[in-house]
Amino acid sequence: AQKVTQAQTEISVVEKEDVTLDCVYETRDTTYYLFWYKQPPSGELVFLIRRNSFDEQNEISGRYSWNFQKSTSSFNFTITASQVVDSAVYFCALRGPQQGAQKLVFGQGTRLTINP
Amino acid sequence: DGGITQSPKYLFRKEGQNVTLSCEQNLNHDAMYWYRQDPGQGLRLIYYSQIVNDFQKGDIAEGYSVSREKKESFPLTVTSAQKNPTAFYLCASSDVRGGGMRPSDTEAFFGQGTRLTVV
């Protein structure tokens, strides 16, 4: 069975602080894909990143960076110099190697509040 | 603009009534999905469809029904059999022409959701 755990239910920081959102996953598949999505107050989920299980390189996109560690089954997300617009619920998700439709398994989400 | 449109944004249902949530996409995606979001539980898959006239149950299909008569549309009916229907419902779609293995296949696009409340 697949499972994604985001242990941090809520995080609140002051603007310009760095913040890391944790994601731990469980799967028996050797090939799998990990995702992060952002859910702003408007409700839709916005895709941030995909990482496959064979690519352990860390990725940086502007103020966002992701740390994928297979040894600890973790895929953590760091926002550097946080801004008020980063306030949202963030979801980590996992899918297996099956072709066709993407059946995503989501974590519980982390509500991030950036205070001015 | 291409995207996914869900309607209505807010929906109120009386006990014992069936209600239908609309989801339309103009992204030419073959696959469509319905997720339910409850506070503290993340998103859970209700139903999904990979092609017109075909759909599969997800993890929490009981009390729900769907149809896929057109590629663009994937309506969800919440039936009176669903004991706790109050939740936020999200529709999504994805391109699976590459078998789900191409980078372009792996992004699921989501609508803005429908908040259903039982009154």
Image (cartoon, helix red, strand yellow):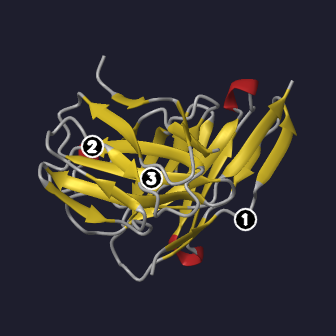
Residues at marks 3 and 2, CA–CA distance in whole angstroms: 12 Å
Of the residues shown, which amino acid type is indicated by label 2? Phe
Quarter holding residue B91: top left
Q: Which chain letter matches label 1?
A: A
Mark 2 element type: loop
Left or right of B69, for residue A90:
right
Q: Residue at x 46, y 64 (%)?
A: B81
Q: Residue at x 72, y 65 (%)?
A: A7
Residue B65, image x, y percentages: 32, 57
Residue B48, image x, y percentages: 29, 56
Residues at marks 2 and 1, CA–CA distance in whole angstroms: 33 Å
Residue A104 visible within the image: no
Mark earlier in primary sequence (3, 2)? 3
* Mark 1 crowd level (few <14, some 14–19, many ≥20, 10 Å Cα): some
Q: Quadrant of the N terminus of chain A?
A: bottom left
Q: Which residue matches tag 2?
A: B74
Q: Quadrant of the C terminus of chain A?
A: top right
Q: Which chain letter matches label 3?
A: B
Q: Which chain letter matches label 2?
A: B
Q: Which residue matches tag 1?
A: A7
Q: Which residue matches tag 3?
A: B35
Labels 3, 2: front one: 2
Q: Is residue B34 above or below residue A80?
A: below
Residues behind callouts 2 and 1 on a single chain: no
Quarter holding residue A86: top right
Mark 1 element type: loop
